[in-house]
Amino acid sequence: MSVSTSPTLKPSGFEHHLTGRGKKRGGKKGMVTGLMLTPMVDMFSLLVIFLLQCMSTSPEMLVINKDVTLPSASTGKEIKDAPVLAITSDGVFMDQEAVGTVVEVLANPTRLMNRLSDLRKRWVKSNPSGEFPGEITLQAHKDVSSTTISQIMAMLPSQHYGSIQLAVVAGSSYPRKKI
Amino acid sequence: MAGASPTPQTEGRRSLDAEINLVPFIDLLSVCICFLLMTAVWLQIGAVQVKQSHGTAAASGAVGPYELEFKFTSPTAFQVAIKKGNKTVKSAAIKHDDLGVSLQELDTQLTTWMDALRKGVKNPEEAKNLISAAMVTPKTGVPYGSLVAAMDVLRDHEIANLGVVPVREGN
C-alpha cells in the first residue's frame, strides 16, 4: 500500500476528493494525505489472480488423519486419487473408517480385506469397461514400526491392490551431514 | 483498470464517464484475499510409489540387468547389495550412529557403483535403467520414517520399482 504525504500536492479528480478533506479553512495548508487507490486495487487484483491460480494447480487433496505425522521424502511425485489406508500407532483406518487396532488387523485381517474387496467391487461396477488400477494410498505415521507396515502392505496384493502410494511430505528425508 | 478520476467538464454537458466506487471493490478484494490465504494448502504432499508383486502381477515389467537388495540390520545400519541373477556384483555394509550419515554414505556408494556399472554399458537407454528393481527389508525397531528415507535415496538413483519385503515383528 502506498501512502504519500505531501503538503504541496496539487489534487485533481478523485485525489481532490481525498486531499480536499485535509485542508483547513482560513487559507492554512493542512497535512494532506493521499491514498493511491489505483495501484492498491491493481496489487489486490494480481494477488487474487495469483492465489486462484495456485489453488487451481494444487494436486489432489488428501485428508490426513489427525494422529498421523507423515514422513518426508524429496522424490515424492504427485499423488493420485485412490482409497486411503491410514495406519496410526493405535489403529487402522480405511477411508477414515476404523477397521481395528494394528494388533487386531495383523491377527485377523478379514475386516480390512472385506473393506478393500468392497471398494474394488464398487470401482469395477462404476467402470465396467476399465481395468482396475489397483492403486491405494498408504498414510502411515512415521514412528510406526516398519515391520508392521510391511506386513500390512503384504496383505494388499491379495485384493489386487499392487500399486501402493506412500504418502509423504515434500522435503529432505534426512538431515545432510558431513561424513 | 477502472478509472477513478472523471474527465473535467468543458462545455457544460454531463460527462458519460461514471465514477466507480472503489471502497466496496477494495473490500471485496480484501475478503477474497483473506479467504484464499486461509483456505490455501501450504503442506505439499507427494507419494513414493511402491509395487508389491507378491500374489499379483502388479510388479512392473521394467527390464534392467541388475537388482538391488537393501536390508536394515539396525535402525541406523544396513546392508546393500547389487545382484545380477544370483550373483552378487557389489555389496557393502553401512553402519553409523546416525541414520542421516548412513544414508548419505549409501547415496555416495550408489553413485560410485552406478558410475562403474554404466561404464560397461554401450546402450544409453540400458545405462539409464541399470537396476530393474530394489527390495527393501525392514527390521524390528526401525521406524517407518527411516524406511521411507532409505527408499527416497534409492528412488533418487532412478530405481523405478521399489518393493518392501514383509517381515514379522521380532525379526
Image: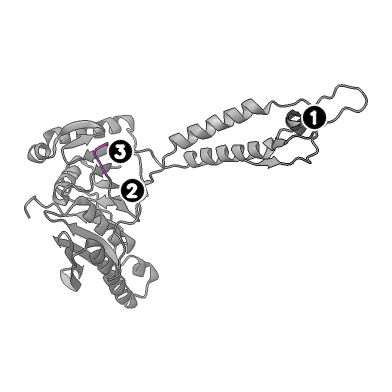
Could you confirm whether marks 1 and 2 are on the same chain? no
Q: Which residues are magenta?
A: A64-69
Residue where numbered disc 3 is placed: A64
Q: Which chain is indicated by disc 3?
A: A
Left or right, residue B33 beside residue A110:
right
Label 1 CA crowd tier, 10 Å (few <14, some 14–19, many 20+): some
Could you confirm whether marks 3 and 1 are on the same chain? no
Foreground disc of the pair 1, 2: 1
Residue type, numbered disc 2: Val
The foreground one among A36 and A7 is: A7
The residue under the point 55% across, 41% down is A50
Q: Which chain is indicated by disc 1?
A: B
| Residue B12, quarter of the rendered image | top right
* Distance Cα–Cα, label 3 vs label 1: 53 Å
Residue where numbered disc 1 is placed: B6
Residue where numbered disc 2 is placed: A169
Is residue A93 part of the magenta span, yes or no?
no
Disc nearer the start of the sequence (2/3): 3
Foreground disc of the pair 3, 1: 1
Residue type, numbered disc 1: Pro
